[in-house]
Image (cartoon, rainbow, N blue to C red):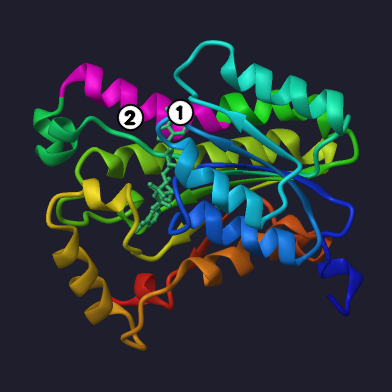
Amino acid sequence: MPNSEYSLKSKKGLVVGIANSHSIAAGCANAFRKAGADLAVTYLNEHALPFVSPVAGALKASMLLPCDVREPGQLECVFEEIADKWGRLDFLLHSVAFAPREDLHNHLIDCTPEGFALAMDVSCHSFIRMSKLALPLMSDGGSLMTISFYGANKVVENYNLMGPVKAALESSVKYMAASLADRNIRTFAISAGAIRTRAASGIDRFDELLDAARLQTPSGHLVGIDEIGRIAAFLASEAAGPLTGSIVYADNGFHIMA
Ligand code: NAD
């Protein structure tokens, strides 16, 4: 990096949400690493480890830790490890979402209270929990990032209960940004364009959503995970200093079209 304000050299970052090399979190982790950051990355469970491990290896990640945000104590263990090894954290990326298939495939009105609560817990409240655990490690300030989607604001066919869940996530970003500003901790959601990933394949008729997104995007081109990664690396850097509480659209302009 020619300009040090854009560099993440000597910065320490946590990346939660790599399922495999196609994950948005993998694209972000690559960009963080390219900008010079040291990374701790997590994997969901033993089934996920064979897919995450090569990504962590390529990143030369300093830590590879288990983290299922539903497992009591696991998130705490991640932060204990980071406290032991690094004693501080400069940024974190939450790139995690889940909803039970049946609830996701039904209209919002038909989703179960349990499905709604689970989706909200994994996809939204875990960001709040994670951020709270990060605070003691961010005494010099920091950057908290999560990944959202346009379906938070407008009705996107088949996005169903993830719409209100992402709306809550984006609102949480703003409230956290306001309350953490005096600690110089900045909070963002990157609203990513549609990308074919493992989580996305859980959305009913995702291919149709991709086709519709391509048609609505001014350039006709969908975004890729490397492009999302470059935005995330910028937001983690000191160059993004004046920004906080922003929902940053990384979607080739998809969201500006009527
Ligand atoms: P992905 O499947 O690669 O990543 C989703 C991640 O969530 C996985 O790593 C999975 O292990 C993790 N996860 C699920 N439940 C978890 C739990 N209980 N504990 C810890 N981790 C858990 O898919 P992706 O598309 O890269 O998704 C990343 C984020 O991007 C999600 O928040 C998703 O909603 C968002 N997003 C995706 C798109 C898209 O089109 N792919 C667009 C906008 C936003």
Task: Determine whether, in the image, residue 27 is placed left or right of residue 116.
Answer: right
Which is more toward the observer, 39 or 204? Answer: 39
Which quadrant of the view contains residue 1? bottom right
Hey, what amino acid is under mark 1? Glu
Q: Residue at x 62, y 28 (%)?
A: 130
Query: What secondary structure predominates along the stretch shown in magenta?
Result: helix
Query: Looking at the picture, how far across and down is residue 34, in whole percent?
Result: 73, 66
Q: Which residue is mark 1?
A: 46
Disc 2 or disc 1, which is closer to the eye?
Answer: 1
Confirm whether the magenta stretch covers residue 123.
yes
Please name whichever residue, 127 or 49, is drawn nearer the observer in this view of the structure: 49
Q: Element at badge 1?
A: loop
Q: How many marks?
A: 2
**Percent from the top left, x then y, of residue 246?**
59, 55
**Which picture quadrant has residue 134?**
top right
Q: Amino acid at mark 2?
A: Ala
Local packing at callout 2 (Cα closer than 10 Å; few below 14, some 14-19, many 20+) is: many
Residue 53 at x, y = what percent?
A: 56, 44
Residue 34 falls within the magenta-colored stretch:
no
Q: Which residue extends farthest top?
A: 72
Q: Which mark is residue 119?
A: 2
Residue 18 seen:
no
Locate the C terminus by quadrant: bottom left
Q: Is residue 158 visible?
A: yes
Q: Give the magenta part as a residue range.
A: 112-127
Q: Position of residue 217 (x, y in %)?
A: 32, 80
| Cα separation between marks 2 and 1 | 22 Å
Q: Is residue 67 left or right of residue 210?
A: right
Ligand 1, image quadrant it occupies? top left
